[in-house]
Image: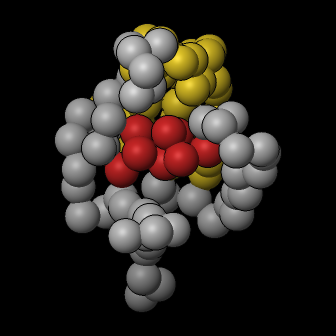
Amino acid sequence: MVEQHPQHELVAADITRIYRDDLGVDVCALEHFTITVKNGEIVSLVGPSGCGKSTFLRLVAGLDLPQQGVLLYDGQEITQPHYERGFVFQEA
């Protein structure tokens, strides 16, 4: 018998995340961001500082919630942290 592996999929559809900086100014970190990552794919998020890379990872980890759009892992909406999703911070 061949062992079956789960076919994980991450879907981010029309994600917008705005936060308030230390000076009280609203900053749009992600605007209408959409991506689908299927099981076995390798994805790299590349861009300058402040373009939304870490914000997106925090959303996937369930540490933050988007103001708009839907974020799904295996068809389930991401609303909180879960042991199947996480990341390592660059600095503690």
Q: Is residue 39 left or right of residue 84?
A: right
Residue 15 percent location from the top left of the image: 52, 21
**As rendered, which of 53 and 12 lies closer to the eye?**
53
**As rendered, which of 37 and 61 lies closer to the eye?**
61
Residue 85 percent location from the top left of the image: 36, 58
Q: Give the total number of marks visible in the rendering.
A: 0
Residue 87 percent location from the top left of the image: 43, 64
Q: Is residue 45 left or right of residue 68?
A: right
**As rendered, which of 71 and 59 lies closer to the eye?**
59
Residue 2 can be seen in this image: yes
**As rendered, which of 32 and 7 lies closer to the eye?**
32
Residue appearing at x 63%, y 65% in the figure: 40
Residue 85's place in the image compared with 11, above or below, is below
Residue appearing at x 32%, y 35% in the figure: 64
Residue 41's place in the image compared with 38, above or below, is below
Question: Residue lying farthest bottom?
Answer: 1
Residue 19's place in the image compared with 60, above or below, is above
| Residue 31, quarter of the rendered image | top right
* Colour scheme shown: secondary structure
Q: Quadrant of the C terminus?
A: bottom left
Residue 39's place in the image compared with 36, above or below, is below
Question: Residue lying farthest right?
Answer: 47
Residue 33 percent location from the top left of the image: 63, 24
| Residue 83, quarter of the rendered image | bottom left
Residue 10 can be seen in this image: no
Question: Residue lying farthest front?
Answer: 23
